[in-house]
Amino acid sequence: YGTVRTDLKLAEEEKFSTAVHEAGHAIATHVLMPDKHLDYLSIQPRSSSLGFVSYRDESENARGQLSMTVTQLKERIVVFLAGREAERLMLGEDAMSTGATDDLRRATGLALHAIEECGLDPEIGPIALDSRFSVAEHYRGAVAERLESWLSEAQSRCANLLREHKDSLKVVADALFE
């Protein structure tokens, strides 16, 4: 899981924020993907991250799931946003950190993949858009609108899920902080 950064000691406030963030990912995954089993949950800084959650997939395929349904894609996007939303719920809007930068990139990338490459958005339709086709420029505005819709829907769903499981979120965050 990477080398522990012994040269980096987090301030208590940042340590708690990281605990809340990682607890959010853990709770969202537990609720939305019960077939994934928690392998490791840590707020020890490693490489370029302050914490992380690792899961084992109980798939018979050694590489894991090779394709996903729209529901599974959307659930994964919710999980990517869960650290950020946990910070908002537990610490307040003004205390949210930049720790979710990679999570946001991954959520955005997955939504774009579904919309542009897999044809899974009902409003855009069954078309694969990429730079090889001049028609892609025609869809740019529509793709941006649908991307915003997918991410907004995931953020709302995530906020509701974490509010519903706020007690568990606090227990996990407190345990990580200790």
Image (spheres, helix red, strand yellow):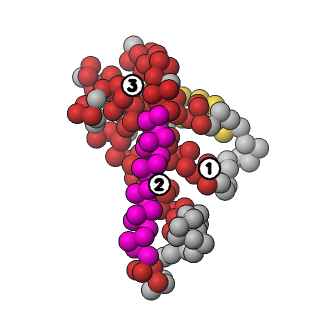
What is the spatial separation of the Cα atoms under label 2 and label 3, in whole angstroms? 27 Å
Nearer to us of marks 2 and 3 is 2
Examine the rendered structure and indicate whether residue 36 appears above or below residue 6.
below
Residue 175 in the image: state x and y as whole percent.
Answer: 45, 15
Mark number for residue 71?
Answer: 1
Magenta-colored stretch includes residue 144: yes
Sequence-first tag of 1 and 2: 1
User: Neighbour class for label 2 at 10 Å: few (<14), some, many (≥20)?
Assistant: many
Residue at x 56% of width, y 35% of height: 29
Question: What's the magenta region?
Answer: 139-160
Q: Secondary structure at mark 1?
A: helix
What amino acid does circle 2 point to? Trp
Mark number for residue 150?
Answer: 2
Write down the quadrant of residue 149 in the picture: bottom left
Q: Secondary structure at mark 2?
A: helix
- Front residue (pair 10, 147): 147
The C terminus, quarter of image: top left
Residue 17 in the image: state x and y as whole percent.
Answer: 32, 27
Q: Is residue 130 left or right of residue 89?
A: right
Nearer to us of marks 3 and 1 is 1
Please name the residue that numbered disc 3 is placed on.
19
What amino acid does circle 1 point to? Thr
Write down the quadrant of residue 21 in the picture: top left
Residue 97 in the image: state x and y as whole percent.
Answer: 28, 36
Examine the rendered structure and indicate whether residue 11 appears above or below residue 61.
above
Magenta-colored stretch includes residue 75: no
